[in-house]
Image (cartoon, rainbow, N blue to C red):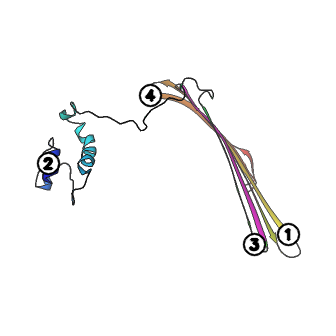
């Protein structure tokens, strides 16, 4: 504990824990312990007058940092597209089922607009072999969701959202 007190001299140490604002329980002194304690103290120090001489520096993650593209030269014009396709098939002696899912998304966020569009699809087929006949159950679901927001002031925006879905399971066609 003496080592920590010598290295971190800008805090007041107390013996009575009820007088402390911050509690640090040290069971062993290891390499790097002082640094970890100082890292934890930064948020408290930043609220005091001793924060004025505080210097924070971050070493580069790589030896040579290179900029690969200018963010202003965005060929996608701030659009982000997503495609997801998944499926599974399961079978036993008298039953099998297949489930296919797909999702398309398009998102664009700029200083003035936020646009989000999603299309989800699901196809599920189950077959039950009853010996002399096969019963097939098919469920199809789909949905479309849109979200459009425009900034009208620094902390204010106005938006519109809309959705539509269809489901053979719930007997719905293009409901919103």
As drawn, the label of residue 134 is 1
First reached walking from the N terminus: tag 4 or tag 3: 3
Whole-number angstrom distance, CA of label 2 to CA of label 4: 46 Å
Residue range of the region highlighted in magenta in the rendering: 95-124
Q: Which residue is mark 2?
A: 5
Whole-number angstrom distance, CA of label 4 to CA of label 1: 60 Å
Residue placed farthest to the bottom in the image? Answer: 131
First reached walking from the N terminus: tag 1 or tag 2: 2
Q: Between label 1 and label 2, give the one nearer the viewer.
A: 2
Answer with left or right where residue 146 lies relative to residue 39: right
User: Do we see residue 148 in this rendering?
Assistant: no
Residue placed farthest to the front in the image? Answer: 63
**Residue at coordinates 28% horizontally, 44% vertically from top-left?**
39
Kindly report the secondary structure that dominates the magenta region of the rendered protein. Answer: strand
Q: Which residue is mark 3?
A: 92
Whole-number angstrom distance, CA of label 4 to CA of label 3: 57 Å
Q: Which residue is mark 4?
A: 155
The residue carrying pointer 1 sits among few (fewer than 14), some (14 to 19) or many (20 or more) residues within 10 Å by Cα, namely: few
CB atoms of marks 4 and 3 within 8 Å = no
Q: Between label 4 and label 3, give the one nearer the viewer.
A: 3
Q: Is residue 172 magenta?
A: no
First reached walking from the N terminus: tag 2 or tag 4: 2
* Percent position of residue 77, x then y: 61, 27
CB atoms of marks 4 and 1 within 8 Å = no
């Amino acid at each position: 504990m003496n080592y920590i007190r010598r290295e971190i001299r800008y805090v007041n140490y107390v013996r009575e824990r009820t007088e402390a604002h911050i509690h640090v329980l040290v069971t062993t002194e290891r390499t790097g312990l002082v640094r970890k304690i100082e890292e934890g103290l930064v948020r408290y120090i930043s609220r005091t007058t001793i924060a004025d001489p505080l210097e924070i520096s971050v070493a580069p993650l790589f030896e040579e940092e290179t900029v690969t593209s200018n963010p202003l030269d965005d060929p996608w014009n701030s659009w982000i597209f997503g495609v997801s396709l998944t499926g599974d098939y399961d079978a036993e002696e008298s039953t099998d089922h297949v489930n296919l899912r797909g999702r398309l998304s398009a998102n664009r966020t700029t200083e003035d607009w936020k646009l989000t569009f999603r299309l989800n699809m699901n196809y599920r087929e189950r077959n039950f072999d009853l010996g002399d006949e096969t019963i097939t159950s098919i469920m199809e679901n789909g949905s479309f969701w849109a979200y459009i927001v425009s900034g009208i002031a620094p902390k204010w925006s106005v938006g519109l959202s809309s959705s539509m879905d269809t489901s053979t399971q719930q007997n719905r066609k293009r409901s919103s």
